[in-house]
Image (tube, rainbow, N blue to C red):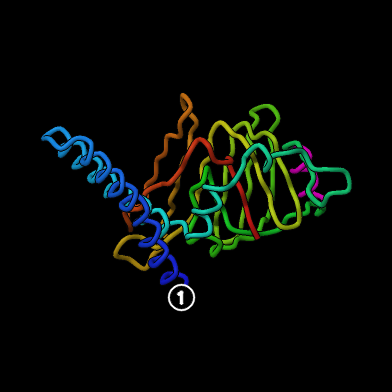
Amino acid sequence: MRKLINFIAGILAGIAPLIIAGILGVLIYNELQSLTGIIICIIMGLLAVWSAILIFKKIQRNGIFDFMTVIVASPDLDNLKPTEGSKTKERTPKELAELNHKGQNLFKSGTLKIFGDWHGEPYQESLDILRIDYDESTKQMEIQFSEDTKILIEEPDHILESPSLLKILSAKKIKLEFQHKKKNSTEEGNYFKTYMVTKNKIETATNMDWVKQKIDASIGQDALIIFN
């Protein structure tokens, strides 16, 4: 059902740039009935088709709800400091690790989203947090999850934790390590995804070989969000 909803939503959302391009094309051609006007309309049409395809593919990857959240969300409001008495707490990397070692961390499990890129299906691949460690000398955090999955985070900063969410707003680099069946095999293999902030953009790399999957990461997204 979810795939059907995303498919229909993708088509409807993709139609929007085509309608806008069509209306603008008619207005432009009415004012500029020449070869130049025709060329402009053709270029607008091609751009609209390209935009429609991108929107459709993004909704199929991330889901319509996540797509709409990115459009209407306000990062400034979303990242305000927790108010007094709020269930959301601001943590330092060292504090989060120490709370985990004592079994006092608020957040226990959820699905991973790194710089806007989901690990697995959106909201579907829930993992338990087994251990959180932080090395002050290297400024590196390691989060170990169930199912032989872990995350290495360089220079994590601005951490928010609640019973339903763990959010790290910024980081220099994140490496996700996990296991998955090898291509054309029943054996498990070790795979990774890396996300590095370089000159105001995210550079990514992976050794996944069983599927051609775009790493949909963006510098405008929070470094790590784990939802339950």
Q: Which is nearer the eye, 59 or 226?
A: 59
Q: Residue furthest front?
A: 31
Mark 1 neighbour class, 10 Å CA radius: few under 14, some 14 to 19, many 20 or more: few
Q: Is residue 214 left or right of residue 65?
A: left
The x and y percentages for residue 1 are 46, 75
Relative height, residue 127 to residue 41 (above, below)? below
Relative height, residue 47 to residue 165 (above, below)? above
57 falls in the magenta region? no
Q: Which is nearer the eye, 128 or 159?
A: 159
99 falls in the magenta region? yes
The x and y percentages for residue 72 are 56, 48
Relative height, residue 127 to residue 154 (above, below)? below
Q: Which is nearer the eye, 71 or 149?
A: 71
Q: Is residue 80 left or right of residue 213?
A: right
The x and y percentages for residue 17 are 34, 49
Q: Residue furthest left?
A: 35
Residue in the picture at 52% in, 47% down: 71
Residue in the picture at 84% in, 49% down: 86
Q: Amino acid at mark 1?
A: Met
Residue under label 1? 1
Residue in the picture at 67% in, 33% down: 157
Toward which corner of the image does residue 129 lie, by quadrant?
A: bottom right
Q: Is residue 184 left or right of residue 196?
A: left
Circle count: 1
Tell me the quadrant of the picture where the C terminus can be found.
Answer: bottom right
For label 1, the SS is loop
The x and y percentages for residue 196 are 48, 33
Residue in the picture at 59% in, 46% down: 73
Q: Which residues are magenta?
A: 94-102
Q: Residue furthest right?
A: 85
Magenta stretch mostly in which secondary structure?
helix
